[in-house]
Image (tube, helix red, strand yellow):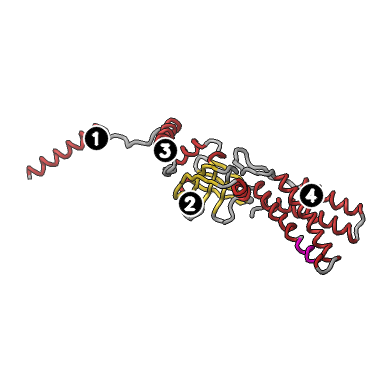
Amino acid sequence: MGKTAKLEFTRRLIPLSLGVLAVVGGYFFMSVLSSLLCLAAAAGIYAALPKQRAPSGAVTPVSKPSVAALDLTGFLLGIVFFPLAIIGMVEASGGLAFLALLCLLPASASFLVFTVAVRQETSWVRFFSNGFEFTQFGLRVRVQYEELKKIEVRLWQAAGWVALFQSTVGSIGRRSAVLLNGAESTKTLVFKRRDGATFTMSSELLPDLQRILISIDRAGIDLPEGISEFQRKKIRERRERMYGGPEKEPPRSEQKEVARIAALIEHARRSAGH
């Protein structure tokens, strides 16, 4: 996890702790004014900490619901259910204490919601002429096209909530990164590196897909199998217009060829004389 992701978690966890303290402390030992000051401090910390924006030209994941809605949901879950669990386990007994303990389950869900929000804020991909840079949870990986083993085109299909979950959460493994558009059906580009790492992106999110394919073709990497022969021809024609055709071996000079033939004839004459 990168520094930006840690900062985004801090932006949410400290205000959540202050909010829980305001409610629990207000019930047991704090005055109303002190509780309000805790809530004000929580809001101030959330708004004051610096926030890193995605670089210009970067492709960001689709967030449904928005990051603000995710944060609001996380704070509501935590500030409502954590105090219920704490106060209930202290004040109640028997079955009521057990019910209070169960309140920790929805309260803990606030951490999952915050994780999704942080992922949305600190994940993006940028393309360059010789490769791309994938950032997830603030950790950056620079991949050059020459490092790729294979590129595939896959049709990614999922039901509504599943598609939303995949586009929002992304990937779970350390050697896989996913950037989807949240649609139930999307055509994806799967970049496979030689070390086994994979990077999956919705083609609909990429701003200039043809230029990316031209850069891949220029790097000498085979174009994805899902691209038709007509599209391949168009891509190569545009590449030749932009960068020129492939370098041809320069023809031999006629004078050098004549001199070589003359030297062979002279050598044959001398051999015949001996």
**Viewer-proximal residue, 270 or 93?**
93
Query: Please, which residue is most extreme toward the left here?
Result: 273
List the residue tagged with mark 4: 45
Q: Secondary structure at mark 1?
A: helix
**What's the CA distance linking mark 1 and mark 3?**
45 Å
The amino acid pointed to by label 3 is: Ser
Mark carried by residue 228: 3
The amino acid pointed to by label 1 is: Lys
The amino acid pointed to by label 4 is: Ile
Magenta part of the chain: 97-102
Q: Is residue 95 left or right of residue 239?
A: right
Residue 165 vertical position relative to residue 264 in the rendered view, above or below: below
Q: Residue at x 44, y 50 (%)?
A: 149
Sequence-earlier tag: 3 or 2: 2
Few, some or many C-alpha atoms within 10 Å of disc 4 (few <14, some 14-19, many ≥20)? some
List the residue tagged with mark 2: 193
**What's the CA distance linking mark 4 and mark 2?**
41 Å
Mark carried by residue 256: 1
Label 3 or label 2, whichever lies nearer to me, is 3
Sequence-earlier tag: 4 or 2: 4
Label 1 or label 4, whichever lies nearer to me, is 4
| Residue 4: in magenta span | no
